[in-house]
Amino acid sequence: NKVLAFKSKAPKPVEGHQNSLRVLYSQNKDAMNQPRRFARNIPQAPERILDAPDMIDDYYLNLLDWSSTNVVAIALGDSVYLWNAGDGSITQLMQTPGDGSHVTSVSWIQEGNHLAIGTSKNTTQLWDCDQKKRVREMDGHSARVGALAWNAHVLSSGGRDGIIVNHDVRIQNHISATLTGHTQEVCGLKWSPNGSQLASGANDNLLNLWDDRMTQAPTFSLNNHTAAVKALAWAPWQKNLLASGGGTADRMIRFWNTSTGQCLNAVDTHSQVCSLQWSKHEKELVSTHGFSHNQLIVWKYPSMVKMAELTGHTARVLHTAQSPDGTTICSAGADETLRFWKILSAAGQDRKESSGSDGLMKMKAIR
């Protein structure tokens, strides 16, 4: 049980000597303190491309949505088509009557198979897509209806007349409120996940926040954007966090605390912001853009570091919708194509998991 020990201490180093390992360690000390960056494989090509002829190239319309039952609704000219993402079947749901009339917006109810459709004839229609039958047609606007948003049984519609109408679709006298906070066309409309706040954006460059109980005036009227505010997205994992995007003269994505009206951050994207989608399972945001790259960008939040930049559309990427499982973004471009990008994480997905492939590209026409 002997203990080994030096009889005398080690000699002191000569003056000015530096241990090379200490230099190496100290030089990398800052790098070691930085948080580890998780690298996730993001496919650079779409899994599928669908041809979408007669897609109207109009920034102020909202022509795409993806239902909780996995059906994509797309408005092409005067018609609405349904593409079942499960079996790939395509059906025509409806066609607007009359010369020059066209569909201006579509929005699925949060749960179920009812689809709201706005038209250039100033009306809002409600369709049962299981029965392929129009349930009702609602008025309230004096100009086209370009934006729609659901909150349980209440459907909000925004028009070129600058007003927002809340329709209670359960009752005959459906207009429950008329909101008059904009002076130009309403092009963005989104209810918060808990249904307590409505965000509206318009061509008057205003972002308005409305309380579901107070309809006389907006809780906040925010004028930070310098162009039309169409792109709106509520964070699904953080209460009162809203992202908004501005048009060609603005190009900014802004983040808001909607309980205080405070702008938390602003990022210059250098191009028109057409749409925004939050990931359901990660702190990530997808934005789509117009001139000059017509791209999709995946951002890490809150650092707003670009995780990926996806190109392929040859004209501005006007609309996006997200699959029910939160993994896939469908983008609709003025190049008359729909592209399906499997770029977001699934619920409970292992962070180190990656597909290792850019997916199988498939071409098909909507009609």
Image (cartoon, rainbow, N blue to C red):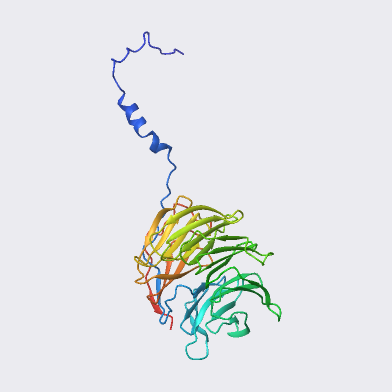
Q: Position of residue 321 (x, y in %)?
A: 49, 69
State the residue in front, 145 or 320.
145
Left or right relative to 168: residue 51: left
State the residue in front, 118 or 185.
185
Q: Position of residue 358 (x, y in %)?
A: 37, 63
Using the image, determine if residue 60 lies above or below residue 103: above
Q: Position of residue 334 (x, y in %)?
A: 39, 75
Residue 64 visible here: yes
State the residue in front, 321 or 343.
321
Tell me what residue is drawn at x 44 percent, y 66 percent. Answer: 247
Tell me what residue is drawn at x 46 percent, y 66 percent. Answer: 329
Using the image, determine if residue 270 lies above or below residue 72: above
Using the rendered view, name the quadrant where residue 219 is placed. Answer: bottom right
Residue 344 visible here: no
Left or right relative to 253: residue 19: left
Using the image, determine if residue 197 lies above or below residue 116: above
State the residue in front, 104 or 306.
104
Using the rendered view, name the quadrant where residue 289 is placed. Answer: bottom left
Q: Position of residue 59 (x, y in %)?
A: 45, 72
Question: Quick one: which residue is furthest to the top in this view?
Answer: 7
